[in-house]
Image: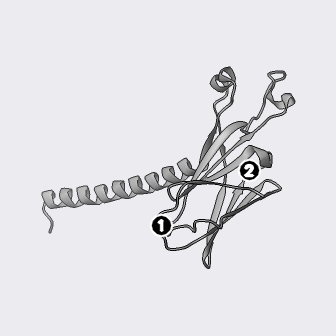
């Protein structure tokens, strides 16, 4: 038969394991949300104070053979408003989603406003394998940015801008 102190020690140990497990899962969830949520910054400082808008710029990344295939959903953004940069084993996607005056103005009463407008950036960390120096391809069609990144074993790749076709 267990003594009272042994029971308390056992319960404390089980409780600590449960709490640490929940904390680990919460941290994992928080990290994933931090990577997905993007702050859209309005150029107008007054508008930015009124409307702190956050949105999701969803990313799918898959390794296929010797390439990473990356799809980024950015509907409503014109191609000339996008830039992709490779720096420090991460892709940085920057852009601006502009609202038409009809949606941006203060006339009328909003019931639901889930669309984010303004400048944004999304950093996508790449897997630990190095990327090839020269052959990254980016295409933008129908609101989907598709990026193909060759994987090659090399120590360091200098930062550079990726052209979008």
Residue 138: x and y in percent read 72, 60
Q: 24 or 18, which lies in front? A: 24
Question: Disc 2 designates what residue?
Answer: 74
Residue 77 visible in the current orientation: no
SS for callout 1:
loop
User: Residue 139: x, y in percent?
Assistant: 76, 60
**Residue 110 located left or right of residue 65:** right
Residue 59 lies left or right of residue 144; in this view the side is left
User: Which secondary structure lies at badge 2?
Assistant: loop
Where, quadrant-wise, is the C terminus in this rendering?
bottom right
Q: What residue is shown with label 1? A: 128
* Displayed quadrant of residue 101: top right
**Which residue is pictured at 35% across the width and 54% down the height?**
19
Q: Quadrant of residue 133?
A: bottom right
Q: Is residue 30 left or right of residue 95?
A: left
Q: Residue at x 55, y 67 (%)?
A: 131
Q: Are marks 1 and 2 in contact (CB under 8 Å)?
A: no
Vertical arrangement, residue 141 with respect to residue 76, above or below: below
Q: From mark 1 to mark 2, how far is it between C-alphas?
A: 26 Å
Q: Residue at x 19, y 58 (%)?
A: 9
């Amino acid at each position: 038969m267990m003594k009272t102190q042994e029971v308390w020690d056992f319960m404390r140990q089980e409780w600590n394991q449960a709490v640490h497990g929940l904390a680990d899962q919460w941290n994992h969830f928080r990290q994933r949300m931090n990577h997905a949520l993007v702050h859209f910054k309005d150029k107008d400082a007054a508008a930015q104070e009124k409307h702190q808008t956050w949105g999701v710029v969803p990313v799918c990344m898959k390794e296929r053979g010797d390439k990473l295939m990356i799809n980024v959903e950015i509907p409503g953004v014109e191609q000339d408003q996008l830039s992709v940069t490779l720096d420090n084993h991460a892709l940085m996607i920057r852009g601006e989603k502009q609202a038409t005056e009809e949606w941006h103005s203060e006339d009328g009463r909003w019931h639901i406003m889930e669309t984010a407008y303004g400048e944004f950036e999304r950093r996508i960390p790449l897997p630990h394998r190095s990327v090839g120096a020269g052959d990254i391809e980016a295409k933008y069609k129908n609101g989907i940015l598709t990026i193909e990144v060759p994987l090659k074993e090399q120590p360091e790749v200098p930062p550079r801008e990726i052209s979008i076709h």
